[in-house]
Image: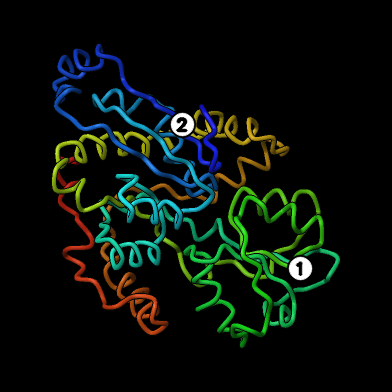
Amino acid sequence: MSILKNGMTRRHALAAGGAGVLAAGMGLQPAFALDTVRQGYQTNMWGMPTYYLLRSGLLEKQGLKFEEFAVPSGNLTMQQMVARQVDLGTYAGPSLVLGHDKGGLVGIAVIEYVGKTARVMARKELGITKVEQLKGLKVANQTGASTGNIFVDQIATKAGLRKGDYQEIRMNVDDMVAAMVAKTVDAMVAVEPYNAIAEADGIANTISEFYDFDKMPVFMAATPDFVEKSAPTIVAYLKAWLEVAKDFKESPNKVADAIFGFYASKGYTMSKDTFSKALGRVEVSLGWPADIKPYMQTQAEILLKEKKIKAIPDWDKALRTEFLKQASA
């Protein structure tokens, strides 16, 4: 894996020519007939099912080649997709609505629920127990991310806090624990595994759980260009995802071992037990839930009210359900 100057990791994992023979032998489309997937994902826990997909060999099994683009949060992947630098990427509903508004991005499947992975946490020594106590304090927030939008538009608002009542410190989630230790911020709106690390090390305590407000479905999204020219690739890709979901359900230790190595390689010090608890908060479930359109309608109405989008999407165009149906057949 190479580290580019902008801090983004990029690994060319191109299946060898033999993969085409293997795919053909398994009754799948040969690799040369499919397009290379430029995969974006976030390096917090939301992106780890995708990281596992890329390390599992399941894409190669489907005859697929890929390149990967890792960034701190999904809203950055969304921006890369709007700029057509990446074909596929993961993020929550609000970011998909924004991406569809800005660049026609579409969801091709709900891959997981992450409401249990996101929390608002305050420095333990401050003794804060409620969100309303953040008034006048410094709150680290990944501005523009789905967690950032939900905190500002729903959690803080319900607690009676509006912008200006607290000092929002723009920060990537992977920098927040260090900022809490340095006491440059008083609280953070963060996701796993950073919450679990802060909790295990006695740095912070939880004052609000996102799951109480939003189950937070995470989508695999695609650019309209990729959907238009690469439908067979998307179907093969989602077949690999169905296998990922099976591994998360039936082989959790195997999955945890593969992902734990990622954070260990980045220098994070946490026990396997702490990591397993953090990963256990991710609910991998590939599908199209019956309540997803009403949920997305609510998210879009919030963003429209905040003047962050121009119009409510046409959900039949923004949520493309046909590819998963084909992959599941």
Which SS class for mark 1?
loop
Between disc 2 and disc 1, the foreground one is 1
Q: Residues within 10 Å of mark 1 (few under 14, many from 20)?
A: many
Give the x, y percent position of residue 302.
39, 80
User: Colour scheme used in the picture?
Assistant: rainbow
Horizontal arrangement in the rendering, residue 271 relative to residue 162 (left or right):
right
Instruction: Specify whether residue 249 is in view.
Output: no
- For mark 2, give the secondary structure: loop
Q: Is residue 285 left or right of residue 20?
A: right
Which quadrant would residue 116 be assigned to in this image?
A: bottom right
In front here: 180 or 26? 180
Is residue 273 in sight in this rendering?
yes
Mark 2 is surrounded, within 10 Å at the Cα level, by few (under 14), some (14 to 19) or many (20 or more) other residues, namely few
Q: Give the numbered dot on residue 197.
A: none
Q: Residue furthest bottom?
A: 160
Q: Residue 49, how many percent across, how many down? A: 44, 41
Specify the amino acid type for callout 1: Asp
Name above or below for residue 250 compared with residue 84: above
Query: How many labels, in total?
Result: 2
Give percent across and percent down for residue 175: 67, 52
In this view, the residue in front, 135 or 284, is 135
Query: In the image, what residue type sits under mark 2?
Result: Ser
- Which residue is identified by label 1? 186
Residue placed furthest toward the front: 5
Residue 234 lies, with reference to residue 96, above or below; the image says above
Q: Residue at x 56, y 84 (%)?
A: 158
Cα separation between marks 2 and 1 = 38 Å
Query: Pointer 2: what residue?
Result: 251
Residue at the spot 52% in from the left edge and 28% down from the top edge: 2
Position above or below: 147 against 248: below
